[in-house]
Each structure stands twice: as structure tokens, then as C-alpha cells.
Amino acid sequence: MKKQLITLITSIVSVIVTYLLNHHLALGPFFANGIVGLSGALLFPKWAGGIYIASFVGMSSTEIIPTLGSAFWAGIIVGLVFANTSPVFDGLGGKGGITAATSVLLYRILLLLIGS
């Protein structure tokens, strides 16, 4: 339970920081992802994989994730998806990209379902 909570928190922070660097500081998606991914690896090596994966979500355009509040909710979704699929995808290449893409897709589906 503690591991899932840390994964959730680091995912939310990762998406938000990447989103801020990408859109509010106009560093662009790749540079923002690189900063967050490298910082995660150096500061929190045990959690670096989840931080890096969540950072992919923060790379989304404002057409997909339009606000900082949206980034928060997308961070929750990627944290939940990563925490619950990590053992399933263990050893498979591309799991970071598929986890992030699945999370953004789920986020968009939820928006459609609630009517936003």
C-alpha cells in the first residue's frame, strides 16, 4: 500500500512539473521530460521509472490536457495505471509509452463520460 501511494504522489508531481516546464515556461515537451526524468533518476532512483513514465503524460499538448488541474487528474490516472500494471508489463519493452498513452486515453474517455 505504501509503495502504491508513493507511486501515485510521484506520478502526480511528475505530470504537473513536466506540464509546467512544457507549457508555462515554454521549454517544450522533450526538454521538460528530460529535466523531470533526469531529476527523478538522480534524486529518487527507486522511483525513477514511474516518474519518467508519468512525465510522458505531462508532455501532452494543451488540446489534450488543457489546464494544470487537468494535469493533476491525469497524474492520478497514470499513477493508478502504473501502480496496477507494473508487474504485468515487467520485462516488456515500451511499457512506459504504453502506460502513458493508456493513461491519457483513459483520462480523455473519462472527460467524455462526465461531459466536460
Image: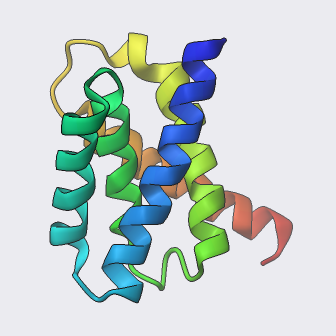
- Say which of 51 and 59 sits in front: 51
Left or right: 20 with respect to 53?
right
Task: Give x and y (percent) for residue 116.
Answer: 78, 78
Left or right: 106 with respect to 47?
right
Task: Give x and y (percent) for residue 5.
Answer: 63, 26
Task: Give x and y (percent) for residue 69.
Answer: 67, 71
Tell me if residue 46 comes above or below residue 38 in the rendering.
Answer: above
Residue lying at 55% horizontally and 50% vertically, measured from the top left: 12
Tell me if residue 76 comes above or below residue 7 in the rendering.
Answer: below
Total labels drawn? 0
Which of the 4 image quadrants contains residue 51?
A: top left
Quadrant occupied by the N terminus: top right
Which of the 4 image quadrants contains residue 71?
A: bottom right
Residue lying at 42% horizontally and 63% vertically, measured from the top left: 17
- Say which of 59 and 10 sits in front: 10
Residue lying at 22% horizontally and 82% vertically, measured from the top left: 27
- Say which of 38 and 113 sits in front: 38
Residue farthest toward the right in the current orientation of the protein: 114
